[in-house]
Image (cartoon, rainbow, N blue to C red):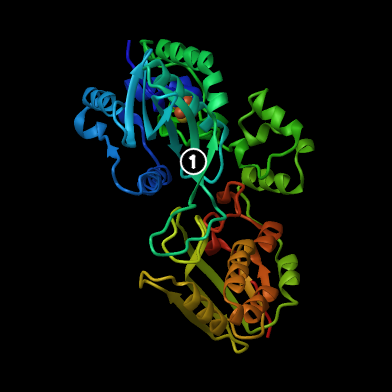
Amino acid sequence: MPNLSKSKLMAYRQCPKRLWLEIHQPSLKQDSAATQASYAVGNQVGDIARQLYDPTGKGQLIDAQAEGYDAAFAQTAELLEGTRPIFEAGFTASGALAFADVMLPMRKGGQRVWRMIEVKSSTSVKDYYRDDVAIQAYVARKASVPLIGIALAHIDSTWVYPGGDNYEGLLVENDLTTEAFARAAEVKAWIAEAQAIANKRNEPKIATGGHCNTPYECGFIAHCQSNEPQAKFSVTWLPRIQTAALKALIATKGVTEMGDVPDSLLNERQRCVKTHTLSNQVYFDATGAAADLAPHKLPAYFIDFETINLAVPIWKGTRPYEQIAFQFSVHRLARNGTLEHQSFLDLSGKDPTKAFAEALVTACGVSGPVFVYNASFEKARIKALAERFPRLKQSLLAINERIVDLLKIAEQRYYHPSQQGSWSIKKVPTRHCPRPLLLRP
Ligand code: SF4
């Protein structure tokens, strides 16, 4: 019977088939770029946690990948006799194994005891972290570790980096000892169930669904979908499925084809998507679009931003996961029809925000509509810049006052069947637009 790691048990909690595939067909897994990026962020936050929990550098990091599990368990047992913090301490017991991000030594009643901290790169305690922590506590206690407490540390998104490699305050702890210790029976049952699945000869028959992305994006989705009949026009392409009746039709009656959904359950936009997807016809309300654009006279500006959001800030005055704009593109359409382009890109490695804000104010002029696709993102970035740089505040907020959201017009006036119910900029096929919309001088 295999000893199951915490990640395998969490895979089981998401989907028994996922656990089975992780064990028997791991080569079928295809982690997305986003999943791989999340691993890298987790490692980065882990490095910072080691600095924070071990400022004097006396702690010991155990590398189970390099040394092997048995050596890691043996080294952990030895270090648990000592007084130094331990990172990636490994335990195995009762059919499971787990590695703790941080173990801190304490004394209670003259005895050596330990406090465990699980470190997450998220900004809150998610429900599935509670399962994660319960497993860690169960395995450690079953392995006879004198565990006095367990906490989950996550990023405080309100914290502002003071600079100078000082990350004190980046992580905030939540004590989960009572609930984690109280869930031992649940964890015991998960291990037994997961082992039963792991020992099955054949892949469990479980259909894909919402659980494939919750709580984690499952890397076996391509494999699982390849064994299922795929809808020709998927019901999931209907935008904003929110009514209880429509949700029930999909969830309980198993409707997968958009064509099988009665019009009476759809709102106007959903009906437009259904009609034009099934008929493979473009919808374009040119008159309505021209009327929407008529109030906005030339010169007009068209802007787009690129940002980065770092879990661990590197620029003084910025927050974790703050969207930091480092690149923009501004096209200016003049009254005579001339199109000019200005751009900004900071590759210096220094905080780009001030230079970005100054260049944006210059590029956008002082009058004329500023068109953005899905404006809430750019507006929020401009507002944040205005708050950060008081000298530019008035000019930046004036740009926000001129912004016109093209997404709202596109959602109302245009739909191409290839959009599959989405108006994301990546889905709207502008080259198929029947004719250019006119902006008037
Ligand atoms: S893709 Fe979905 S059904 Fe397939 S293993 Fe993953 S979670 Fe389970």
Q: Is residue 440 left or right of residue 365?
A: right
Measured as percent of width and height from the top left, residue 202 is found at 38, 13
Measured as percent of width and height from the top left, residue 75 is found at 24, 27
Q: Nearer the viewer, residue 440 or 243?
A: 243
Where residue 89 sits, quadrant-wise, is: top left
Q: Residue at x 56, y 72 (%)?
A: 303
Measured as percent of width and height from the top left, residue 370 is found at 63, 75
Q: Residue at x 70, y 33 (%)?
A: 261
Measured as percent of width and height from the top left, residue 32 is found at 40, 42
Instruction: Answer whether residue 284 is visible to the viewer in this image.
Output: no
Instruction: Answer whether residue 57 is visible to the viewer in this image.
Output: yes
Q: Residue at x 36, y 17 (%)?
A: 143
Quadrant housing the N terminus: top left
Q: Which residue is mark 1?
A: 153
Where residue 111 sits, quadrant-wise, is: top left
Inspect the image, locate mark 1, and give the three-letter code of the amino acid beneath it: Ala
Q: Residue at x 50, y 43 (%)?
A: 154
Quadrant housing the C terminus: bottom right
Q: Nearer the viewer, residue 100 or 7?
A: 100
Q: Residue furthest bottom?
A: 336
